[in-house]
Image (cartoon, grey):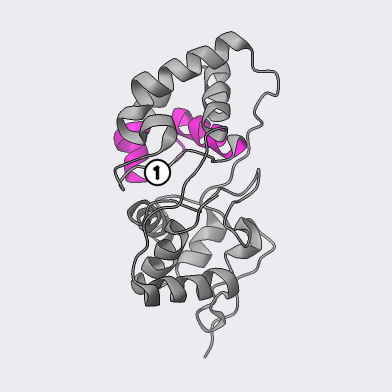
């Protein structure tokens, strides 16, 4: 029997962004954020958020509200995936609200780029699931919330150009509820590993 299609009435996201970035970030906060981004964050996330290691997410071009919400979650220790526990909780602990908002703003202003392409067949399968979903497995189209170009919105994160390894890791975290986002758990539990790989491979190829 076919599983019921997961409802799209909730948020289908790689973690919801709930914070609001200050529109009036002052020059001193912007300068402080850039110093932290260049001197500390770049070690893992690369220059201007262009991560080289597929273990760490690309931050360039990500929506500021989403980034702020994730920094707040790391600091509050409410995000439960392995890298949150191993890296980001400690990194976010000393950040105040102004610096978190300025960091989120800094990365949102950087220009994203497309990543390398995987096999053509895998990318095509990933595009099909991303755009149309898989009704037989109860998987709705990712594009419904993240957009046809995977650029996201203020509430839904940008997925275009993200590393395959990072996306796979997050989907598994949703699947096993390490990241406790109910709707994404509902989406991810219907995905087989090969379909996760296909979706992630497709997303990695997308540019600005």
Residue 57 position, x and y percent, is 40, 43
Q: Which residues are magenta?
A: 65-88
174 part of magenta stretch: no
Residue farthest toward the top in the current orientation of the protein: 28
Residue 206 position, x and y percent, is 49, 57
The answer to whether 142 appears left or right of 114 in the picture is right
- The residue tagged with tag 1: helix, strand or loop? loop
The answer to whether 130 appears left or right of 57 in the picture is right
Residue 45 position, x and y percent, is 37, 35
Magenta span dominant secondary structure: helix
Q: Nearer the viewer, residue 133 or 127?
A: 127
Residue ID at (37%, 38%): 84
Please count the marks in the image.
Answer: 1
Residue ID at (49%, 13%): 32
On the image, which quarter does residue 168 sit in?
Answer: bottom left
71 part of magenta stretch: yes
Q: Nearer the viewer, residue 98 or 202?
A: 202
Estimate how packed mark 1 is, as few (under 14), some (14 to 19) or many (20 or more) residues with alpha carbons within 10 Å: many
* Vertical relation: 18 (above or below) 164: above
Residue ID at (67%, 23%): 22
Residue ID at (70%, 24%): 23
Q: Would you say residue 93 is visible in this rendering? A: no
On the image, which quarter does residue 18 sit in?
Answer: top right
Q: Identify residue for label 1.
A: 57
Residue farthest toward the bottom in the current orientation of the protein: 1
* Vertical relation: 2 (above or below) 142: below
């Amino acid at each position: 029997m076919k599983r019921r299609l997961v409802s799209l009435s909730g948020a289908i996201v790689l973690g919801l962004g709930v914070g609001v970035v200050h529109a009036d970030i002052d020059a001193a906060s912007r300068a402080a954020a850039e110093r932290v981004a260049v001197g500390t964050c770049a070690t893992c996330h690369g220059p201007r958020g262009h991560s080289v290691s597929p273990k760490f997410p690309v931050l360039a071009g990500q929506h500021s509200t989403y980034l702020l919400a994730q920094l707040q979650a790391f600091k509050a220790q409410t995000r439960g995936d392995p890298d949150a526990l191993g890296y980001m909780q400690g990194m976010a602990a000393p950040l105040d609200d102004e610096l978190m908002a300025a960091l989120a703003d800094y990365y949102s202003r950087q220009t994203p780029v497309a990543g390398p392409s995987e096999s053509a067949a895998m990318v095509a399968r990933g595009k099909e699931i991303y755009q149309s979903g898989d009704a037989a497995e109860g998987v709705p189209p990712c594009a419904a919330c993240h957009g046809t170009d995977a650029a996201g919105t203020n509430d839904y994160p940008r997925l275009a150009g993200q590393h395959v390894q990072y996306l796979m890791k997050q989907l598994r975290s949703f699947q096993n509820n390490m990241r406790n986002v109910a709707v994404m758990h509902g989406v991810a539990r219907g995905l087989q590993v090969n379909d996760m790989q296909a979706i992630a491979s497709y997303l990695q190829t997308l540019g600005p």
